[in-house]
Image: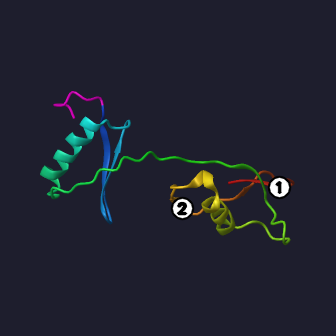
Amino acid sequence: MVEARSKLRVESVHKTWDGVSMSTNSVASAAELEVIKQWLKKTAGLGESIEVEPHLPLFLKILGVLYWDSKSSLSITPAQVEVALLNSSLFEGITLASMPRIMKVSPSSDMSAI
């Protein structure tokens, strides 16, 4: 990246089950992605068909969700929240990295934060 006179810095590189995961200090441009691809070909011995898919880590906090299931006296479950998110048109094309975590806002409240 220094030779390409880029401000992009690769902060970490990890081997994953299906490839390589790299963390950078900012979103890479098309030219910077090409430099990264060429570097991967040389150093990691990867073939010509390298697919680079930039991803931004995003975290979502949902407030004001009822803690108790309206159909029973039990609290809502992560599986119920996941089904609701996956069925929502707002979450089309979004993959959850893990199951949602449900936290009660306060001991005396019936609301939760996800």
SS class, disc 2: loop
Any part of residue 100 in sight? no
66 to 9, vertically: above or below: below
SS class, disc 1: loop
**Amino acid at dot 1:** Pro
- Label 1 crowd (10 A; few <14 / some 14-19 / many >=20): few
29 vs 75, left or right, is left
**Residue 34: image x %, image y %?**
22, 41
CA gap, disc 2 and disc 1: 25 Å
**Amino acid at dot 2:** Ser
**Residue 52: image x %, image y %?**
29, 50
55 to 79, vertically: above or below: above
1 to 61, vertically: above or below: above
Could you say which disc has been placed on residue 107 in the image?
1
State yes or no: residue 97 in magenta.
no
- Label 2 crowd (10 A; few <14 / some 14-19 / many >=20): few
Q: Who's the residue at 50% across and 55% down the image?
A: 93
Q: Who's the residue at 64% across and 57% down the image?
A: 88
- The range drawn in magenta is 1-7
**Residue 72: image x %, image y %?**
84, 72
**Residue 69: image x %, image y %?**
80, 66
User: Which residue is labeled 2 in the image?
Assistant: 98
Residues at discs 2 and 1 in contact (Cβ within 8 Å) = no
